[in-house]
Image (tube, grey):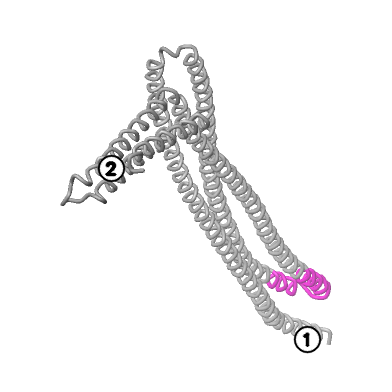
Amino acid sequence: MFAFLHIIAVITILSLMVFFLYLDRKSQKANQNYPSLLITIGIGFTFFGVALGLMDFNTDDPTAGLAVLVNGIKTAFWGSFTGVAASIILRFHSLICLKENVAESRQDDQLNQFYQEHTALSERVNYLQTINTTLNNNNENLIRALTDFGLDLDQKNKINMQEMLQAITTSLNGIEQIQRSTQGYIASEIAELRGEFVIFAEKQAEQTTEIFIRALEQAIQRFNENLTNSLGDNFKQLNVAITQLVEWQNQYATHVEDQTQNYAVMLEQVNEMKDDFSAVLANVNQFNQIIQQLETAITSIDYKNTEFNSRIEGFYGALDSKIIDIEHARQLLDNGFKASESHMQNMQSTSEKIFDEINGYLEASHTRALNTQKQSVEHIDQMQQQIKQSFESTQQQLSENLTTLDNQLQQTLNQSLITLAQQLGSLSTKFAQDYEPITTNLKKVMDSMGRGIQ
């Protein structure tokens, strides 16, 4: 059995070689592990033969174990030689007959890798479109909210201004009515007083003499002078009150102009906010342009892939028709693969740069959008505070002015009534003082007339 061990090794390795060739032909692809496996099996038979030759070798009687040692060495050499030869045959077979299949496997791997990158790129494009849609919706909602806020603010300002103007108009109408009623009351009192004096003068003129008429004229003249002086003071006080009212109206007009300027500043700030959001929308339009560029790049990649497949198909046809030029074709194919690999690397690097730029631009845009939104919120808060402060100050000033005006009118009216009462009291006292010598003179006249008659 040990004499035929090398034949068994050779047959085993050759059988495995034939089986491996069958498998390569069946799959139309060269397996790179088969040649290494045959060499390993040959090395295994080598060590096995050496081990068998040395197992029964007697160093004391080398001649007796020489035959077994030679059979073991023979098995070792034939196993190693057959394994190496079978490995070389498989490698030549893969190089000559299955080279195009190896290239096809590489191409399939590259196409699979390209398809995976294409899928990832499409997913990123969809994600960018989703982000773009979300940003557009958020910007539209924010613009609508700002527009509604501006309209509500304008309506509220108009309503408040109308209410303030109505209140001021009502107050002025009340003041005018009070002034008219006061003037009417004073005029009616003066007219009644004059009428009574005229009636009294007529009656006394009929009953008395020229002395009584002169005394009465002097009393009436003094009364007119006193009445003129007192009414002049009242009209002076009324003019002062009206002057203060005109000054308050001028101050309120100035305040209204300042409030209008504040509203104009607020509108300018709102317009600036609209311009900022327009810039954000312009940046979003740039996102659409970038996505369109990516779609164009993907279309060009698909076109180049189709062109690449057509070139490979043409190469296969030329390879079938020209077997003699296979080495030259192999070199051309290697060059084509190198060019394709370099092109794919360039495309990959370009895609990575594009995505890095897109990511950077998105981050910067997101940061700008957040800053703009934050600034907008701050501006809105400031405007609300300014509006609130202005309304509070306006209401406070208006209430103070109305209170001051009511107090002044009340004081003026009270003072006018007090002055009128004092004047009427002094007039009655003066009339009594003036009437007493008249009665005395009349009594003397009557006494003298009685004596004359007697």
Instruction: Check the image and name the residue furthest to the left.
Output: 60
Residue 414 left/right relative to 199: left
Instruction: Determine which quarter of the picture holds residue 50.
Output: top left
Name the secondary structure under disc 1: helix
Name the amino acid type tagged 2: Gly
Q: Which residue is located at x 77 percent, y 67 percent?
A: 188
**Magenta segment main secondary structure:** helix
Residue 211 left/right relative to 30: right
Local packing at callout 2 (Cα closer than 10 Å; few below 14, some 14-19, many 20+) is many
Above or below, comparing residue 367 to residue 112 in the picture: below
N-term mark: 2 or 1: 2
Name the amino acid type tagged 1: Asp
Above or below, comparing residue 30 to residue 262 in the picture: above
Name the secondary structure under disc 2: helix
Q: Quadrant of the N terminus?
A: top left
Q: Quadrant of the C terminus?
A: bottom right
Instruction: Determine which quarter of the picture holds residue 128.
Output: top right
Q: Is residue 213 magenta?
A: yes
Residue 319 left/right relative to 405: left
| Residue sitting nearer the eye, 158 or 55 | 55
Residue segment shown in magenta: 192-220
Instruction: Determine which quarter of the picture holds residue 392.
Output: bottom right
Residue 123: horizontal and vertical position, in percent? 55, 41
Tell me the mark number nearer the camera, choosing from 2 and 1: 2
Q: CA distance from mark 2 to mark 1?
A: 195 Å
Q: Is residue 62 magenta?
A: no
> Residue 332: which disc?
none
| Residue sitting nearer the eye, 24 or 120 | 24
> Residue 447: which disc?
1
For label 2, the residue is 72
Residue 408: horizontal and vertical position, in percent? 60, 70
Q: Which residue is located at x 39 percent, y 38 percent?
A: 8
